[in-house]
Image: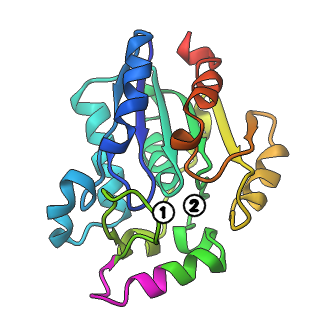
Amino acid sequence: MANVVIVPGGWHGGCELSPFARRLRALGHDVFTPTLTGLGDRSHLAVMRPNLDTHIEDVTNVVEFEDLSNVVLCAHSYGGMVITGVADRLAERISALVYIDALVPEDGDSWWRLMNDYFRTIAIEGADGDGFGVSPPAGMDVRCRPHPLASFLQTIHLTGRWKEVREKLFVYATGWSDSPFPPTVARLRRLPDWRIEELPVRHNVIAAAPEQFLAILTTLNAMQ
C-alpha cells in the first residue's frame, strides 16, 4: 500500500496526528507523522533557532532515511511550505501532494507573505515574549508549543520540480471566517493538474472531520 507522510501545521506536533495515523495503518498503509524541530516532543530543540530550511530538512530526512518511494506527502496549514520544499528536492519519490487547508507557495514566498492580517497579528503579538517563538493562539491543543518565528518569515527557494508530482490535491476548509486561503483556492482552480475538495469545517480538518478527510484521501490513485 502507500507510504503516507503527514506534516502537522504551525504550533502542532506529530503526536496529535496519531489517532488518524492508526486509521490509515489499519487499512494497510505505512504512515509517518514527523514532528518539526522545536515543536511537540522536539520542543527542547527550539534553542537551535530552527527555520523553514530546518523543517524541510526534517521531513526530507524521514523520506531519505526510511528509504521511502511512492510517497503520499500531506500537510496541514504551515506544513504546506514544508512539503513543497521537500517535493522540490525529492519529486521522483513523491506520488501525490495533499494540502490540507495549507499554504501552496511559489518561489520566493513565505508564510508571512501568504498569510492575511489576522495571522500576521497573531505572529507579532505571539512573539512578544522572546522574539524567537510565536506562542500558540488561545484554544489550541494543550500540546501545542511556541512556533519558531524564523520559519514564518523565511522565504522558500524552489526550482519548480515539485510541480512534476502526478497528483496534487487541496482540501479546502470552508467553515471559518478568518481563512487566508480563498486566493490560493482561486489560483489552483485555474490549473488543470489540481483537484479541489471542500469540507464545511474549521481549519484543523483532520481533528474536525477525520472520516470525511479519510474518505477523500483514500480516493487518490496513489492510495490504491
Classify 113 as above or below 202: below
Residue 135 seen: yes
Q: Quadrant of the C terminus?
A: top right
The segment highlighted magenta reads: 123-133
Q: Which residue is mark 2?
A: 107
Q: Where is residue 167, by image quadrant?
A: top right
* In the displayed structure image, the side of residue 204 where residue 172 appears, left or right: right
Disc 1 to disc 2: CB gap under 8 Å: yes
**Quadrant showing the N terminus:** top left
Q: Nearer the viewer, residue 213 or 3?
A: 213
Element assignment for label 1: loop
Callout 1: 10 Å neighbours few (<14), some, many (20+)?
A: many
Query: Does 130 appear in magenta?
Result: yes
Disc number for residue 148: none
Looking at the rendered structure, the kind of residue marked 1 is: Ile
Q: Earlier in the sequence, mark 1 or mark 2?
A: 2
The residue beneath circle 1 is: 156
